[in-house]
Amino acid sequence: MDKVVATAAEAVADVPDGASLAVGGFGLSGVPNVLIQALYERGTGALRVVSNNCGAMESGLAVLLAAGRIARVTGSYIGANKEFARQYLSGELEVELIPQGTLAERLRAGGAGIPAFYTPAGVGTQVAEGGLPWRYDGQGGVALASPAKEVREFDGTEYVLERAIRTDFALVRAARGDRHGNLVFNRSTRNFNPLAAMAGKVTIAEVEELVEPGAIDPDAVHLPGVFVQRVVALTPEQAADKRIERRTVSV
């Protein structure tokens, strides 16, 4: 039951080239930076990443992206990541952009054992009809486009069929975790982290504070340890490293 691994490097040692990864975080909040850095240092490449966004400010997944280690991204937000946009438009990167709520539910469904579900999000658009550019040819043309999806009517409303997401591995960050893998997320870090963790066949969690089993009130657990296979305890310095994308002050 003790799922603690000594180092981040050891925790990601069996992640192969070409693996699919569900990665938690939103912007710079709740991003498993230490595990991502360990993957970078290991040299793992051709990764197929599922995450809300692909890093920002040379942090998070942007580290792997800039090094050319990511082959495909499934996400919902490009934002101000200029390198992401450059690789996508130049044909170096395959990108599946989907509605944010649909992404969240596809991850959750994968972890819950639900193979697919119907949603009204995207009906009447290229999300359902197909034709969204997944990969450009580098000359302004589309080399690979999204396929059409099944649309079905229920009680007079049309819904599009979306498939669940399961990945080889998942990388997440939590505020607290015990040796059994039970996790607690702090405020906005409880965004895509629980969902990404559910979607991974092997889920690795970096935790800012490691506690003994029983120290977390069962009612306070945000993600049960059944979804987590490995836990890495961060150092105080690593736990305190929390960047702010846009600092806003008032007078």
Image: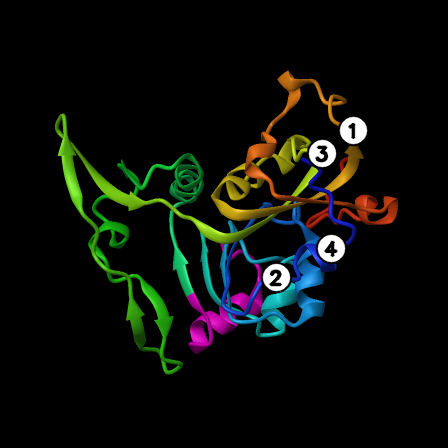
Label ID, residue 177: 3
Could you tell me if the residues under marks 4 and 2 are in contact, i.e. CB atoms within 8 Å? no
Q: Amino acid at mark 2?
A: Asp
- Which residue is at the far bottom? 139
Q: Amino acid at mark 1?
A: Glu
Label ID, residue 14: 2
| Residue at 40% from the left image edge and 38% from the top image edge | 105
- Helix, strand or loop for disc 2: loop
- Residue extent of the magenta highlight: 77-94
In space, the residues marked 4 and 1 are separated at their CA atoms by 19 Å
Could you tell me if the residues under marks 4 and 1 are in contact, i.e. CB atoms within 8 Å? no
Could you tell me if the residues under marks 3 and 1 are in contact, i.e. CB atoms within 8 Å? no
The image position of residue 109, as x and y in percent, is: 39, 38
- Judge depth for marks 3 and 1 and give the one in front: 1
In space, the residues marked 3 and 4 are separated at their CA atoms by 15 Å
In space, the residues marked 1 and 2 are separated at their CA atoms by 26 Å
- Helix, strand or loop for disc 3: strand
Looking at the picture, does residue 30 appear above or below residue 73?
above
In space, the residues marked 4 and 2 are separated at their CA atoms by 11 Å
The image position of residue 90, as x and y in percent, is: 45, 77
In space, the residues marked 3 and 1 are separated at their CA atoms by 8 Å
Magenta span contains residue 78: yes
Q: Is residue 101 visible?
A: yes
Identify residue for label 4.
8
Q: Amino acid at mark 4?
A: Ala
- Helix, strand or loop for disc 1: loop
| Residue at 45% from the left image edge and 39% from the top image edge | 111
Dot 3 alpha-carbon crowd within 10 angstroms: few under 14, some 14 to 19, many 20 or more: many
User: Looking at the image, what colour scheme do you see?
Assistant: rainbow
Q: Earlier in the sequence, mark 1 or mark 2?
A: 2
